Image (cartoon, helix red, strand yellow):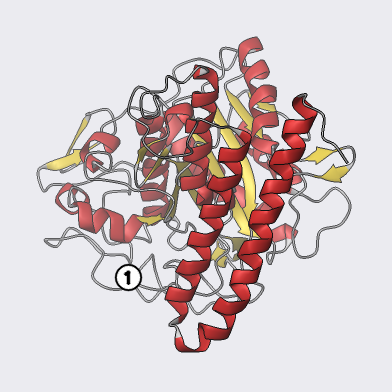
Amino acid sequence: MRLRRGGSGRLMRRFLAGTILLMLLLLGGRFIGRAAGSIPRNDYRNMIKAGGQWLVEAIWTQAHPGEQIGRGQDGDGQHQGITDPDPSYRKYQTVRTFYKEHQYLAWYGNEETGQQSLEEPGSLMASGQGSMSGQGNMSGQGNMSGQGNMSGQGNASGQANTPGQLYTTGQGGVLPGGNVLQASETLTGTLNRPLTGNTYVMEQLADYDFLMKHFYSVHTSTTAGRDLMDAKTLLGKDMSMKGDNSKPQILIYHTHSQEAFADSGPGQTVVGVGDYLTKLLEDKGYNVYHDKSVYDLKNGQLDRSKAYNYALDGITNILQQNPSIEVVLDIHRDGVGENLHLVTQVDGKDTAQIMFFNGLSQTPEGPIEYLQNPNREDNLAFSLQMQLDAAAYYPGFTRKIYLKGLRYNEHLRPKSSLIEVGAQTNTYQEALNAMEPLSELLDMVLSGK
């Protein structure tokens, strides 16, 4: 058969050349395989990898004569004196390289922890054995590992007179926003309940190692440095509600609306949990917009791959129509090992533990430029202030704050939070019960009292 001289003929010749090269590689592989018994496994793998790379470059050279792949490229996008004729293609190559080098972001993109055991401090088993590593009280037996107040300012059994939102120094307490409480005063906030958990002095919280050890879990997809995790800055921010309740103030939505619980019946998903939280907050006088839109179904099938993109479109539209909204809460439930039951006791009720979740928009290599979050510091302040109130009034109710690499749409408002309510191993009622202390924590921070 005679090949035509046109473009199709050239493509055919390149295809045949590539096929011949592939056959040569496979034949060579047989001899390599026979010798593999005397070659270390890593060296053998490197040989195969090098052969594959050689084949790709050879085929590329056949298809794009005069160009080289990934070699001799300088900062101006030139290849050994040959100017790149297509800047848009070079940009595409850059993006492709980024995703190749950060493949783990695709695997770690969702917010589930996948926790398999009780290694994470704060996790409680259904038997009520208490928390691990000192995260809150242990069945009323007091705190562990000395995490209570220092210098005799109180302990985890409720003898202190300063609630968790106060970080006492001996001369008085410091409130978010810089307001000072005299040492002789007592602040109860909006709660009429005793202190049963831990309070902390600023000297403790200002210690980066102490702060990270006791309050945060940092996923391998990100990093949280000393410059970002500054407790004095985060606790000094005023996260109180500024507007009145004549217009919507709080948005509750669900990126993964289909998340259900161990015994869920029809309609008993995180959306129902959001309904209850909405009611509790409205009973406290807040104006709440509950978005029940479905962002994780496509053509009737579960599709979570683009749920955050769909949710971003949906809630951005809501916020544009309701600029009075100051607080954005994305209510989820975690996914963990089937042997793990995240439950504690609150006011005599079996209650799912919750976890505040912050996306940092950065990998260990640096910021993710296309996922910038100008509200990141405020997001961190919002969750940390609620976490410390929980430590004081609801010991064992919250797990450590989880930090991960992506953004999770928390950039839309300063007071934004993604909240994991229990996991698939919790009952629906346990998840509902968790909304009662959560609503109190939100009210404590948003009321500014």
Residue 194 seen in the figure: no
Q: Give the amino acid at mark 1.
A: Asn
**Callout 1: helix, strand or loop?**
loop
Relative to 367, is 206 above or below?
A: below
Left or right: 215 in relation to 24? left
- Residue in the picture at 32% in, 43% down: 165
Using the image as rendered, state which of residue 46 and residue 245 is in the foreground: 46
* Residue beneath disc 1: 143
In the image, residue 158 lies at what x, y percent? 33, 61
- Residue in the picture at 66% in, 58% down: 22
Left or right: 70 in relation to 246? left
In the image, residue 430 lies at what x, y percent? 67, 60
Using the image as rendered, state which of residue 236 and residue 230 is in the foreground: 230
Residue furthest toward the front?
2
Picture quarter with the N terminus: top right
Using the image as rendered, state which of residue 439 and residue 265 is in the foreground: 265
Residue furthest toward the bottom?
37
Relative to 96, is 168 above or below?
A: below
Residue 227 seen in the figure: yes
In the image, residue 190 lies at what x, y percent? 44, 38
Relative to 397, is 366 above or below?
A: above
Would you identify the image quadrant in which residue 160 lies?
Answer: bottom left
Left or right: 56 in relation to 130? right
Left or right: 23 in relation to 71? right
- Residue in the picture at 42% in, 52% down: 390
In the image, residue 378 lies at what x, y percent? 37, 30
Using the image as rendered, state which of residue 353 and residue 82 is in the foreground: 82
